[in-house]
């Protein structure tokens, strides 16, 4: 293939733009902030699920506490009634009196048991409320972390998009008027060779595969017409001669 030496040099500018675009795409896809955001969003879901569970448990315990309080209250009222009856002196029948005293003493024991239950349920409720409060705190923290990360990721993506638009404009200026066959060959090689289709010879080395050209190839490059499109024998990329080629 033949191509004007200036066009061959311009291919290096196109390559430079393409390499920068590839870097920008890679950066855009691998933003650590975006990864942190995904992790924070997973954490947010987890905290949300935990919070729903904890709130359900706390609400169940609140009902249990209310039930325990009502049980205690009922026994207290019954004891007060019995005591009042006892104190009134209205019961003359000794059997009835004994039975009432029995009932009172068994109510005292029952009250103690119920108060133990009440206390235990209240302690559990307090623990559940603390869990809810801690999870609400976590939720607030993760929400603000997400808001912060969303802002960072948006800003980074906008800056990358801006940079990309600049490089794309640079690239289209560099490709303008380039022969279609040269650009086509470059694109084809670039697609198969890790995004690098054209490379300069730098001090006798192919900058595509970074291998020193064998003396015979140097000789051929030296002898080739300036408009001859050279290819690296090793990596098959287009080789462009520059003042730094060392030929
Ligand atoms: Zn090479």
Image: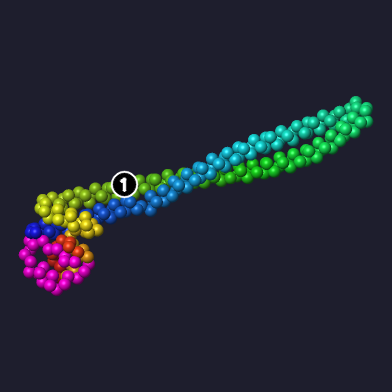
**Quarter assignment of residue 107:** top right
Residue 190 visible within the image: yes
Specify whether residue 203 is in view.
Answer: no
Whether 115 is drawn above or below 204: the answer is above
Give x and y (percent) for residue 208.
21, 63
User: Which residue, as the protein is rendered here, is positioned at the far bottom?
Assistant: 215
Provide residue 240's location: percent of width, then percent of height. 14, 62
Q: Residue at x 8, y 62 (%)?
A: 228
Query: Which residue is drawn at the image coordinates 84% and 30% (left, top)?
Result: 82
Left or right of 23, for residue 122: right
Give SS at disc 1. helix
Q: Which residue is mark 1?
A: 158
The span shown in magenta is: 210-234
Say which of 205 and 141 sits in front: 205
**Picture coordinates of residue 205, whole percent (x, y):** 19, 69
65 on left or right of 237:
right
Mark 1 Cβ inside 8 Å of ligand 1 = no
Residue 218 among those drawn in magenta: yes
Locate the N terminus and report the quarter of the image it occupies.
bottom left
Badge 1, how many Cα within 10 Å: few under 14, some, many 20+?
Answer: few
Residue at image point 76% right, 41% down: 113
Q: Quadrant of the C terminus?
A: bottom left
- The spot of residue 207 in percent (x, y) is 20, 65
Which quarter of the picture shows residue 183? bottom left
Residue at left 74%, top 33%? 73
């Amino acid at each position: 293939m033949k191509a004007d030496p200036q066009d061959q040099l311009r291919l290096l500018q196109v390559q430079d733009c393409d390499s920068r675009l590839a870097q920008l795409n890679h950066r855009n896809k691998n933003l650590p902030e975006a990864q942190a955001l995904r992790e924070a969003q997973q954490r947010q879901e987890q905290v949300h699920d935990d919070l729903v569970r904890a709130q359900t448990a706390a609400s169940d315990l609140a009902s249990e506490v209310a039930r325990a309080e009502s049980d205690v209250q009922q026994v207290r009222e019954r004891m007060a009634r019995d005591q009042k009856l006892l104190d009134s002196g209205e019961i003359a029948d000794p059997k009835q009196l004994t039975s009432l005293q029995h009932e009172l003493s068994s109510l005292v024991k029952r009250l103690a048991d119920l108060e133990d239950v009440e206390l235990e349920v209240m302690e559990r409720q307090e623990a559940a409320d603390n869990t809810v409060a801690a999870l609400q705190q976590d939720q607030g923290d993760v929400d603000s972390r997400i808001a912060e990360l969303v802002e960072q990721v948006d800003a980074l993506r906008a800056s990358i998009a801006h940079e990309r638009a600049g490089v794309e404009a640079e690239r289209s200026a560099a490709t303008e008027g380039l022969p279609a066959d040269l650009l086509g060959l470059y694109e084809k090689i670039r697609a198969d060779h890790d995004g690098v289709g054209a490379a300069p010879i730098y001090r006798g080395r192919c900058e595509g595969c970074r291998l020193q050209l064998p003396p015979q190839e140097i000789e051929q490059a030296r002898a080739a017409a300036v408009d001859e499109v050279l290819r690296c024998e090793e990596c098959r990329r287009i080789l462009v001669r520059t003042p730094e080629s060392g030929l």
